[in-house]
């Protein structure tokens, strides 16, 4: 986490770049999920209880939860691991999500944002999102949640 924090040299500037794109969160969330389940079919079994077809109400609902959590994290960059304590426990300990799955989801988020917001998705914006998703990856798969 130290290294990724250091990458965010100007946190306020980065946060404002990231926040710009979260206004489209609900629309992109379902697309992220559909793309993710397409490129990472081994994750389908984790979402077996959801209708996984493109744009289904289930994917829209889960996509919104996903992007809302991402947006909340952006607002609390300095406090990310505390903010994500419950989600870390869920993803690390209960669901046992792998690093590879987390990377695939991050790539899918980048692709979806780039497709939906071509004008806003500048090189700086891409870099800020990449750095932030790296931080989230570290936090959500952090073993710290296992310590009582
Ligand atoms: C940026 C990374 C991620 C974020 C921000 C995130 C966020 C969330 C949120 C907010 C929830 C809902 C929790 C609740 O309802 O209390 C959730 C649930 C879940 N997540 Fe993630 N997640 C991420 C990555 C992943 C990945 C990579 C996978 C799978 C490979 C995954 C699998 C799941 C599953 C299976 C659930 C439970 C779904 C359900 O039963 O409805 N998540 N996640």
Image (cartoon, helix red, strand yellow):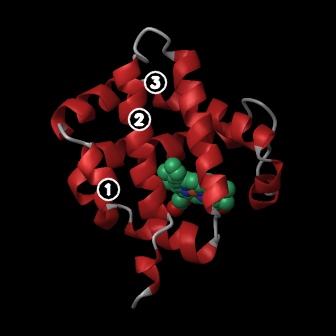
Q: Which secondary structure lies at badge 2?
A: helix
User: Hey, which quadrant is residue 81 in on the image?
Assistant: bottom left
Residue drawn 47% across and 84% down? 146
Q: Mark 2 or 3, which is nearer the eye? A: 2
Q: Which secondary structure lies at badge 3?
A: loop
Q: In the picture provided, is 98 more to the left or to the right than 119? A: right
Q: Residues within 10 Å of mark 1 (few under 14, many from 20)?
A: few
Report if the CB atoms under discs 2 and 3 are less than 8 Å apart.
no
Q: In the picture provided, is 109 more to the left or to the right than 86? A: right
Q: Which residue is mark 3?
A: 24
Quadrant where ligand 1 appears: bottom right
Q: Earlier in the sequence, mark 2 or mark 3?
A: 3
Q: In the picture provided, is 63 more to the left or to the right than 143? A: right
**Residue 110 pos. (x, y %):** 54, 31
Q: Mark 3 or 1, which is nearer the eye? A: 1
Residue drawn 32% across and 23% down? 20
- From the Cβ of disc 2, is ligand 1 less than 8 Å away? no
Q: Which residue is mark 1?
A: 3
Rendered position, 19 above or below 93: above
The Cα–Cα distance between marks 2 and 3, rounded to whole angstroms, is 14 Å
Give the numbered dot on residue 65.
none
Give the numbered dot on residue 129.
2
Q: Earlier in the sequence, mark 1 or mark 2?
A: 1
Q: Residues within 10 Å of mark 2 (few under 14, many from 20)?
A: many
The Cα–Cα distance between marks 1 and 2, rounded to whole angstroms, is 15 Å
Q: Can you name the residue that lies furthest to the bottom here?
A: 148
Q: Residues within 10 Å of mark 3 (few under 14, many from 20)?
A: some
Report if the CB atoms under discs 1 and 2 are less than 8 Å apart.
no
Q: Quadrant of the N terminus?
A: bottom left
**Residue 132 pos. (x, y %):** 38, 44
- Return the residue nearer the eye: 41 or 6: 6
The Cα–Cα distance between marks 3 and 1, rounded to whole angstroms, is 29 Å
């Amino acid at each position: 986490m130290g290294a990724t924090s250091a990458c965010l040299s100007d946190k306020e500037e980065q946060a404002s770049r990231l926040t710009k794109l979260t206004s489209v969160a609900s629309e992109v969330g379902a697309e992220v999920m559909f793309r993710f389940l397409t490129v990472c079919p081994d994750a389908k079994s984790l979402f077996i209880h959801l209708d996984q077809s493109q744009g289904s109400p289930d994917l829209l609902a889960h996509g919104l939860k996903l992007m809302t959590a991402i947006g909340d994290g952006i607002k609390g960059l300095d406090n990310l691991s505390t903010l994500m304590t419950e989600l870390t426990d869920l993803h690390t300990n209960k669901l046992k999500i792998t690093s590879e799955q987390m990377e695939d989801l991050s790539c899918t988020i980048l692709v979806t944002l780039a497709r939906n917001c071509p004008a806003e998705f500048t090189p700086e914006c891409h870099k800020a999102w990449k750095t932030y998703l790296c931080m989230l990856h570290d936090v959500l798969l952090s073993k710290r949640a296992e310590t009582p």
